[in-house]
Image (tube, rainbow, N blue to C red):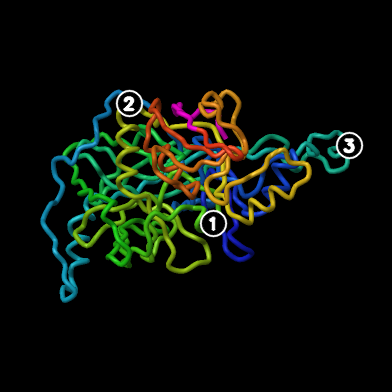
Amino acid sequence: MNKKYLNNNQKLIKLNIDGFEHKNNLTNKFFCNKPITHLLLPLLGVGITFLSACSINSSRNVEASRETNTANAQPVQQSATPNNRPLTPTPEDNNFVVAVVNKVEPAVVQINTSRTVRSQVPEILNDPFYQRFFGRQIPAQPQEKVVRGVGSGFVINANGQILTNAHVVNDADTVSVSLSDGRTVEGKVLGQDKLTDIAVVQVPLNNLPTVELATSQRVQPGQWAIAIGNPLGLQETVTVGVVSATDRSISDIGASDNRVGYIQTDAAINPGNSGGPLLNARGQVIGVNTAIIQGAQGIGFAIPIDTAERIAQQLITQGKVEHPFIGIQMVSLTPELKQRINSLSNSNVRVQADQGILIVRVLPGSPADRAGIRPGDVIRQINNQSVTTADTVQQIIDKSGVGANVQMQLQRNDTTVQVTVQPGSRPANAQ
């Protein structure tokens, strides 16, 4: 499991971290013609950082594999048996959590995975000189072992479609699903999207109880948040807290930006909770539990259900997700950054704007390159909307869709430039 460090004591737990993380040394790394390794946000439509694997992964842990067979896939529906009994909790109702659990728990599942890990043998063990003195007591062939893991998920369709995290099922050889009624069946990964950490698993069952989905647009800090999952393999564990913040980007907490504006909660989330539902006081799903900060108490993160449902729909119908891509690296501009860039004697870039989004790099042949965007340009507006953070630019591009016309107002030295960019689909080999 890859790790990103927030500071000397805290580490951000998450798999598949691509992109740039630190907020120092931008000018030293880019404008001196050296590789960019700090401060830059990910290549728009290229990089994605995820937080923590809240699925268990040790000598008994894993995040398993994927398959994209969609032969029997059905669209996401609020189907057959969601328990839609209205719940209207009040401060005097001490049992509203019990009502929520009774409503949702039948649709929450445990996902067990296994994968084969092959350990590489150091070259020195095959060296004749080494073997002459030490013999062959140490095996010189690669060794294999089976790594097992556990996560959570919830049924979104009575025909057996289960929503979970991509890191729960990534690279798994086998996926099994344990239902609340005691049944355990084999699952198949319909698709997974690492950029948003969403996956859909299909099980060969019908008439399953399903969850009711809310809209995450109405989620507000301070409202109740209830998490159900299988932390450390302990089935059907319930924890309660509140929504601490919304639209929390990974860059807010010291790592690279990504494709999700997370819901932050203080409801306890632990390894094994990944993929489980985060619920409101009415028992409706508002998010998919996915991330924690190791060493910090009461800081967990969930993918908003609006994002998760949109990605799940594409995975079910297409087996993959198309992410809009324009091919730039960018950073939010500040007066301090402007001063640092302009003070470099060997830089051919001079920044005039005090705020906006500085284009640091344009990928050759990308949609941005074809539109005439250049390094050193500053994005001031997108589709007539002023932008001051790279997070906002990323969100607008993501929502625009592949092939849409995106209008950008740029400042290039002392000149205002208007360009139209048509996002493409993110290349599979993009980093």
The x, y position of residue 229, in whole percent, is 33, 56
Pick the residue in front: 406 or 177.
406
Please tell me which residue is depicted at 59% across the width and 40% down the height of the picture.
414
Q: Is residue 409 magenta?
A: no
Estimate the x, y position of residue 300 in percent, counting from the top left.
42, 60
Circle number at residue 129 = 3
Pointer 2 or 3: first along the chain: 2
Q: Is residue 261 left or right of residue 362?
A: left
Quadrant including the C terminus: top right
Foreground label between 2 and 3: 2
Q: State the separation of the CA atoms marked 2 and 3.
A: 54 Å
Seen at 16% across and 47% down, the residue is 82
Q: CA distance from mark 2 to mark 1?
A: 34 Å
Helix, strand or loop status at disc 3 = helix
- Give the label, 1 or 3, closer to the camera: 1
Could you tell me which secondary element the residue under label 1 belongs to? strand
User: In the figure, is residue 253 to the left or right of 239?
Assistant: right
Residue at image mark 2: 70
Mark 2 or 1, closer to the camera: 1
Q: Does 424 appear in magenta?
A: yes
Q: Residue 76, can we see it?
A: yes
Q: Which corner quadrant of the image does residue 11 belong to? A: bottom right
What type is the residue that disc 3 sits on?
Phe
Task: Give the amino acid at mark 2.
Answer: Thr
Give the magenta-colored segment's residue range: 418-431
- Judging by the rendered image, the residue that carries numbered circle 1 is 12
- Cα separation, mark 1 vs mark 3, equals 43 Å
